[in-house]
Image: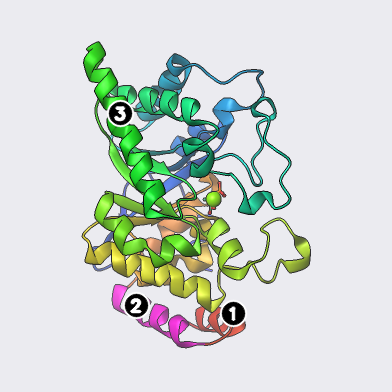
Amino acid sequence: DIGADAEVTHNRVETTDGTEIEVAANVGRPTELAAAVEQGADGVGLYRTEFLFLDRETPPSEQEQYEAYIEALEAFPNGRVVVRTLDIGGDKQVPYLDLPAEENPFLGERGIRRSLGTDKGLFKTQLRALLRAAADASGGTLSVMFPLVTTVDELDAALDCIDTVAESLQMEGSNYTIPELGVMVETPGAVFMVTEFAKRVDFLSLGTNDLAQYVMAAARENEQVADLHDPLHPPVLRAIHQSIQVAHDNDIWIGMCGEMAGNPDLTNVLVGLGIDELSMSAVTIPDVKANVIEIDQSRARDVAARTLTVETSSDVTNTIDNQ
Ligand code: PEP
Ligand code: MG
């Protein structure tokens, strides 16, 4: 268990042969921003905006959101903050938004589907706040990504919303910048269409919690099928591998912000698969950074290649344990 309980470093890290891996934090509550800075995050790889909408009676205004995004950017003057647009539905509820009772909420109107449907007004307000914050940040760089995209039409519609919002900010004479734009790869549909997605955006981010759930057809919160939503099942690993290959073939970067990104036992294999950025809860950042600086890329690639040839999750685990 190399690097367990490692010391905090605020430096960026690279493998022994000089591949820089960005190690960023997931932020899902206001207090997690400070923790991310303390633990030496290079930036924020997943800013879950749901928390801005929780514990209140009405949605936050454009100005409140703008201020929250600026605060995150100021926490990382030399880093990148990847803000995910509102991702509710499924396991993520916001009481005053009156989510319908659906028979299969994980297969229902959630993520980008709501933002392009029932919550289109909220989506545009959020994009206005984001485009303004991207322009005004004196600190880090803002990036924006869309959750649960499954079709090219959804991605095109989301990108159209960015253009519409930019035009209206332009007409008003407001300061704005179109940020770096990305899409989460967290459904099988996205994996099959990842080439088309990669041609349209600046980066991809693997949401392996949902990706494992949907590839394995096993609900992420259902203990009865906990073994099945392990991301080390070969089909999930192969989906990750394919997405990374396609991202690089299209000269864009790809990160991972699902739970597996923060598992120090998996740093070597994920770097071997070619991941450019890992985003995780702040506590695991020092361990993951300590692992990255020990990695020999050619050996890591070799282990990753072996995990892609075996046929069962236990063989994947054994391959990783015996690397
Ligand atoms: C994921 O699905 O892996 C992810 C990072 O998003 P969330 O857990 O918020 O759905
Ligand atoms: Mg998700």
Query: Mark 3 or 2, which is nearer the eye?
Result: 3
Dot 1, crowdedness within 10 Å: few (<14), some or many (≥20)?
many
Answer yes or no: do the residues labelled 3 and 2 have beta carbons within 8 Å?
A: no
In primary-sequence order, the first of circles 3 and 2 is 3
Q: Can you give x and y, in whole percent of width and height, for residue 263 in the image?
A: 54, 61
In this picture, which residue range is highlighted in magenta? 297-310
Dot 2, crowdedness within 10 Å: few (<14), some or many (≥20)?
some
The residue to which callout 2 is attached is 301
Q: Which amino acid, by three-letter code, is at mark 3?
A: Thr
In the drawing, does residue 172 fall left or right of residue 93? Answer: left
Instruction: Tell me if residue 225 comes above or below residue 154 in the rendering.
Output: below
Q: CA distance from mark 1 to mark 3?
A: 45 Å
Between 213 and 5, the one nearer to me in the picture: 213
Q: CA distance from mark 3 to mark 2?
A: 43 Å
- Give the residue at x 58% y 84%: 312
Q: Which amino acid, by three-letter code, is at mark 1?
A: Ser
Q: Can you give x and y, in whole percent of width and height, for residue 25 in the image?
A: 46, 44
**What residue occupies the far top of the structure in this picture?**
172
Dot 3, crowdedness within 10 Å: few (<14), some or many (≥20)?
some
Which labelled disc corresponds to residue 164?
3
Is residue 299 found inside the magenta-colored segment of the image?
yes
Q: Can you give x and y, in whole percent of width and height, for residue 49 in the image?
A: 51, 33
Question: Circle 2 sits in a helix, a strand or a loop, which is it?
Answer: helix
Question: Circle 1 sits in a helix, a strand or a loop, which is it?
Answer: helix
Is residue 27 found inside the magenta-colored segment of the image?
no
The residue to which callout 1 is attached is 313
Question: Circle 3 sits in a helix, a strand or a loop, which is it?
Answer: helix
Query: Mark 1 or 3, which is nearer the eye?
Result: 3
Q: Which amino acid, by three-letter code, is at mark 2?
A: Arg
